[in-house]
Image (cartoon, rainbow, N blue to C red):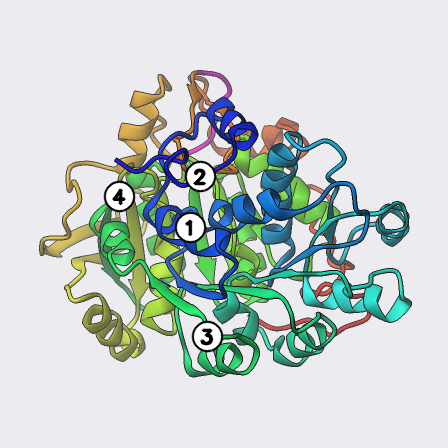
Amino acid sequence: MTTFENLNVSPILLRKLQGQGIVTPTPVQAAAIPVLQSGEDAIVQAQTGTGKTLAFLLPILEKIRPDRTEAQALIITPTRELAIQITAEARKLAEAREGLSVLAAYGGQDVERQLRKLKNGTQLVIGTPGRLLDHLRRGSLKLGAVRMLVLDEADQMLHMGFLAEVEEIISLVPRSRQTMLFSATMPDNVKRLAKTYMDKPRDIRIAETSRVTLDSIRQILVECTDRTKQSALIETIRSQRPYLAVIFCRTKRRASTLNEALQAAGFQSDELHGDLSQAKREQVMRAFRDAKLELLVATDVAARGIDVEGVTHVFNYDIPHDVDSYIHRIGRTGRAGEKGVAITFAAPKDLEALRQIERGIGRKLERQRYEKRGAGPGAEKIVAVGRTGTGADKAGGQGRRSRDERGGAQRPTGRRSDAGGGRGRSAGNAGAPAKGGRGAGSRRGDDARAQRGSAGGASRAQGPDRRGQSERGGGGRGRRGR
């Protein structure tokens, strides 16, 4: 069995990993770390949630010289959430090396604080393209000593329109560098970027990852119409009773509208998209990680890089535009050996997109249908149309099992409760802090709405702050639609 010790990870970093309960490397770590330790360029293709962060952080932290104050390694990420996540992991490991400083540079954060840290010297910089360019143009960040460059989630970075910014940043990094490109997919624009800026890169592909991800997730299709989709979602949430769930919408406006409807129905939910300020985004994610929210309504870009332990369900309220997006979305659940449930809602106009997804994953989704017969309670129900094997457990709602395993009481309507057991974390899934669970004391109707704001400041009573920084990370840049 491969261990981090076999991979020649230094004893001081080994002790840090062991202290976090991380003992066995994931496949992408086992394949990539030796190559990156040797100083070679590498293109690493693996799905989200497979441990890519440690795959590049460990070799970088081994090579950085804390006695030199200039930036020696640069990690470029497409979103603020991913920059924050990587920075948290880097800082935990950097404690093992005295004098090693890590800076996160992203939009929505205090620029003056970043400037002070850069002035005092930092060896590892992690940031989004917009804010990195802002510092480069100010002259507060210099890349002349950078010898290690990471492009993380490269496919998403280019999908978001960052090619020009990324190329400008790369042009300021010395050519005598090691370039590491990590991507879940390998579209043509990512291949062109690699060919232009990398030197004989090693090609590392963890092909089995997507199959493992899919096999651990029960995949369901709920047939409905555009008019009944919202009701179908609410009825499905009530029947599934998720512990934590991410609901994907196509645009920021649809996410906001749906979140309001879910709150009106008595659910503890909040929204995550590019119109929110950074402070609001961090508040929402903190509440979700702490299980003070049950439902997170998000756009694709805002949710990229989110790694929250305990997500039992993913709901595709709007069908993904391609199979890669589908795999990325449902990969938020069924992690670290756990099982999950992914439910996609499809109207007749979505059938072609559905066929493409099923062809791409090589299987048919389990069919259910939303039926509304008349008015009043009990008029709506989800009817099983037919089942095909998905490789995952098909018994009852995953959320009910997860709550029972964690010692919490069942909630008949899927609403949040107050106290109970806790959740642990899995080895190899870096960056997922342990969180308290929930137990008995479910609330209903008006009482739930009256008390929703009491848990951890996660309430939307004042409405979302939409004056925030752009998704591109720099001040004054236009926001991208989802």
> Disc 4 residue type?
Gly
Quadrant location of residue 330?
A: bottom left
Q: Residue at x 49, y 63 (%)?
A: 40
Q: Which residues are magenta?
A: 414-420
Q: Which residue is mark 3?
A: 200
Work out whether 475 lies above or below 333.
below
Q: Earlier in the sequence, mark 4 or mark 1?
A: 1
Q: Is residue 419 magenta?
A: yes
Q: Residue at x 29, y 36 (%)?
A: 338
- Tell me the element at label 3: loop
Q: Which residue is mark 1?
A: 34
Label 4 vs label 1: CA separation? 59 Å
Label 2 vs label 4: CA separation? 61 Å
- Whether label 1 touches label 3, CB < 8 Å: no
Q: Is residue 365 magenta?
A: no
> Disc 3 residue type?
Lys
Q: Which residue is mark 4?
A: 378
Q: Which residue is mark 2?
A: 8
Label 1 vs label 3: CA separation? 16 Å
Label 3 vs label 2: CA separation? 24 Å
- Whether label 4 touches label 3, CB < 8 Å: no
- Whether label 1 touches label 2, CB < 8 Å: yes
Q: Residue at x 30, y 75 (%)?
A: 350
Q: Earlier in the sequence, mark 1 or mark 2?
A: 2
Q: Is residue 355 left or right of residue 137?
A: left
> Disc 2 residue type?
Asn
Q: Nearer the viewer, residue 18 or 457?
A: 18
Give the mark toward the camera: 4 or 3. Answer: 3
Q: Is residue 320 left or right of residue 215?
A: right
Give the mark toward the camera: 4 or 1. Answer: 1
- Tell me the element at label 1: helix
